[in-house]
Amino acid sequence: MNRFDYVRPNTIAEAVAAAAEPGAAYLAGGTNLLDLMKGAIAHPTRLVDVSRLPGLDGIARLADGSWRIGALVRNADLAHDPAFAKTFPAIAEALLSGASGQLRNAATVGGNLMQRTRCSYFYDTASACNKRVPGSGCDARDGDNRLHAILGWSDGCIATHASDFCVPLTAFDAVAEIEGKTGRREVAVDALHPLPGTTPERDSVLAPGELITAVRLPPAASVFARHARYLKVRERTSYAFALVSAAAGLVIEGGTIKEARLALGGVAAKPWRARSAEEMLAGVRLEQAAFARAAQAALADAKPSGDNAFKIALAERVLVRALTLAAAGTPVRVPALPASPFSSPAGVALHA
């Protein structure tokens, strides 16, 4: 680990000023950053500790019906908040499917949005990686790439985004509140992570020093509470990142889908909103054939980035399964194995 300065600001303005300096990085839970530093992948010269900033650790329902989650809220605290879990069951299920219990107790909402890829070539400093060292190449292109992207990838990078939390946030039109040197701005979570293109080293659209202070869910996101699920297929159910995941939310009236929200995880450098599939589902009857057509539309532009053609078929099936589960209705209890296709009905009564 490299030597670094440590700064603990008392206000958001102080934090932004300190982090705007070259080589600075924000530190909150540290569940991703400290691993990157220990592995000599990240080399910040200054750590700006925001873990004690006031006013960023609350969960609130606002007067207009929207929900605001402070960036320092721990993943476990958000997932286990009864009112939040009842209103946004797919988000709670996604949070509970990510990492281990210990990590969920430490990881923060803001840090989850800003976590970096888990591509093995990014973590291996002996490998060429354009995300880690721009212009060095991408050894994943001709390497072990069965876990890599099938949508939105470029020759410069085929890594995927690792977050579970961001997938339903993208589906339900969540917005990140951001503070920077020029003031406050908002960015849709769907637009927060750029595709690699020719600049794969850019993980987000944030400018130097900008800090995510909260995530806000619009009032319309709560209408999906009765029919919302998150499904995650992984190589090890107990603790692993997604091969493919899907968030699905439906508004159903008289056996017809009035409105749908869909997003995929594990398939691209960002959570992938399936807008074409949403449009196809609006106004159609609940039936497996409609789900299958929507899934095919969602993956119409998918192509293998290596030895991962199976992920295209897998993503279609995961999306159909997520829609089927959502159509059946949000369960009263979070499954004992959250988001797993092998889960049983017994679990934690968060949605009751």
Image (cartoon, helix red, strand yellow):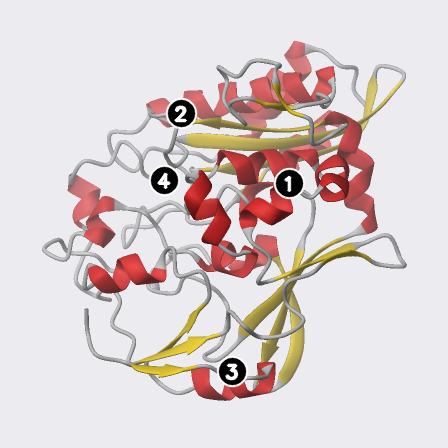
Residue 223: x and y, percent? 82, 37
- Tag of residue 15: 3
Describe the element under mark 3 as helix, strand or loop: helix
- Tag of residue 237: 2
Q: Is residue 167 above or below residue 234?
A: below
Q: Is residue 141 above or below residue 54?
A: above
- Tag of residue 325: none
Q: Is residue 221 left or right of residue 78?
A: right
* Pair 1/4: label in front: 1
In three-dimensional space, the C-alpha distance between marks 4 and 2, rounded to whole angstroms, equals 21 Å
* Pair 3/1: label in front: 1
Q: Are marks 2 and 3 in contact (CB under 8 Å)?
A: no
Describe the element under mark 4 as helix, strand or loop: loop
Quarter of the C terminus within the rendering: top right
In three-dimensional space, the C-alpha distance between marks 1 and 2, rounded to whole angstroms, equals 20 Å
Residue 270: x and y, percent? 47, 49
The residue nearer to you, when weighing 18 against 267, is 18
In three-dimensional space, the C-alpha distance between marks 1 and 4, rounded to whole angstroms, equals 31 Å
In the image, what residue type sits under mark 3? Answer: Ala
Q: Earlier in the sequence, mark 2 or mark 3?
A: 3
In three-dimensional space, the C-alpha distance between marks 3 and 1, rounded to whole angstroms, equals 29 Å
Describe the element under mark 1 as helix, strand or loop: loop
Q: Are marks 1 and 2 in contact (CB under 8 Å)?
A: no
In the image, what residue type sits under mark 4? Answer: Ala
Describe the element under mark 2 as helix, strand or loop: loop
Q: Earlier in the sequence, mark 1 or mark 2?
A: 1
Q: Is residue 166 left or right of residue 155?
A: right
- Tag of residue 149: 4
